Structures are given as structure tokens and as C-alpha cells.
Image (cartoon, rainbow, N blue to C red):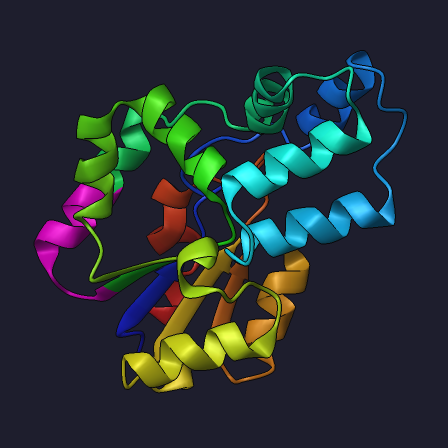
Amino acid sequence: MIKTIIFDFGDVFINLDKPAIIRELKKLGVPFINSEMYAIAGKYEKGQITTEHLLQSFNTMFPHISKDEFSKAWNSIILDFPNHRLDFIEQLSNEKKHTLILLSNTNELHIQQVVKNMSLTNYNRFKNCFNKFYLSHEIQLSKPNLDVYEFVLNENNLKAKECLFIDDTKENTDAAALLGVNVWNNIPKNEDIIDLFTIKKDLF
């Protein structure tokens, strides 16, 4: 029986345009993302460097791109948060049948854009639905490393077999499954989180 549901954020609740960052950077004259750039982005996602460090690093590599231009390209991945999903998670929270946890790989700039896109009021409504709200840049751990799942399980005294983890990235759900966590690798184009109890009815 599932007692705890652990949700990803992007492309589970808020819509993403994942190719957007590369597409927008190309428009600014960055032909491809090299290994150094990925490494910097990875450190930023884990909160190991500040936003200013990120912006300065890319500005040093590409002096013709202003920090504002880079920030806009960086945040182009963040789209809308459909109201029906906010209603769904609020209803689930109000029912108090499950412990609800958010576990997201994200960063300060993206969260700022999320708040801008959905409003601070709606962001707080969303955040308040969860018993725990874990963002990678705040806990300095990121998926799919096993230590982030172990952290969530241990921090909350959870049994893996009583948890369901939902993420749109198969690498992330595969990692959680190694620890015995039930998983749903949802496909954003074909599946919606509001159909959770229909699609995964066998677990409930």
C-alpha cells in the first residue's frame, strides 16, 4: 500500500520546453553546449555555485551575450502551470490520505521564473500542498544519484515499498526503483498527473 507519493516538478506539474535553452542559446551565437558548460550547470543545480557565479562564468565564455540575455535563454525552458494540476494536488493534500513530497532538480533562476509564470500566490498554494518540498539547489543533491533518494527516505523515515515516485525522466525513476521504490515514469505528451489514480490504480 502506498503511503507516500514523491513528485517531480517539471513536466509533471509545470510544463517545460526542454530543448528551449539550447535553441535560444544558438540564436545568441552559442553553437553547442560543451562539457565545461554542462559541468557549471550541474554545479548550479546542486547549489554549489551562486547565480552570479553562473552568469559570470557564461559571460566570460561568451562576452557578447549579456547576463540578462543569458538569463532569458536559461529560463526559456519554463512554461505554464495548468490550473487543473494545481487543483489536483490541493485536493490530494486536503484529503490527507498520503504524505506528499516534492523532489525536483532545479535552480534559483528557474524557480524565480516559475514564480513569475504562475504568480507567487499560486506558487505558495502549490508549495503548501506538500509535507516536504525538496529542491536540488537547496539540499545540494540531485537525481538520478542514489544519495538523493536515500536522503528523502531516511529524512522522512519511509519504507521504499510504501512510496511511489513520479518523474518524467526514465533515468530518475530507474534509479529510485533500484532502492525498491515504486515508480511511474510518466510521459508528458500522453499522460497527465491528474490521472494518477487511474493509471497507477494497481498500487492504490
Please state if 106 lies on the left or on the right of 97 as rendered: right
Please state if 177 lies on the left or on the right of 82 as rendered: right
Residue 136 magenta: no
Residue 24, quarter of the rendered image: top right
Residue 34, quarter of the rendered image: top right
Quadrant of the snapshot with the C terminus: bottom left
Range drawn in magenta: 89-99
Above or below, 58 against 197 in this view is: above
Quadrant of the snapshot with the N terminus: bottom left
User: Residue 130 location in percent, x, y?
Assistant: 22, 55
Instruction: Depth check: give the residue in front, 171 or 141.
Output: 141
Please state if 187 lies on the left or on the right of 38 as rendered: left
Image point (84%, 23%), residue name: 30
Above or below, 135 against 15 in this view is: below
User: Residue 141 location in percent, x, y?
Assistant: 51, 67
Instruction: Depth check: give the residue in front, 179 or 24.
Output: 24
Image point (28%, 86%), residue name: 157
Q: Considering the whole magenta stretch, tell me its main secondary structure.
A: helix
Image point (75%, 32%), residue name: 60
Please state if 99 lies on the left or on the right of 172 as rendered: left
Image point (47%, 58%), residue name: 136
Above or below, 21 against 6 in this view is: above
Above or below, 150 against 17 in this view is: below
Residue 158, quarter of the rendered image: bottom left
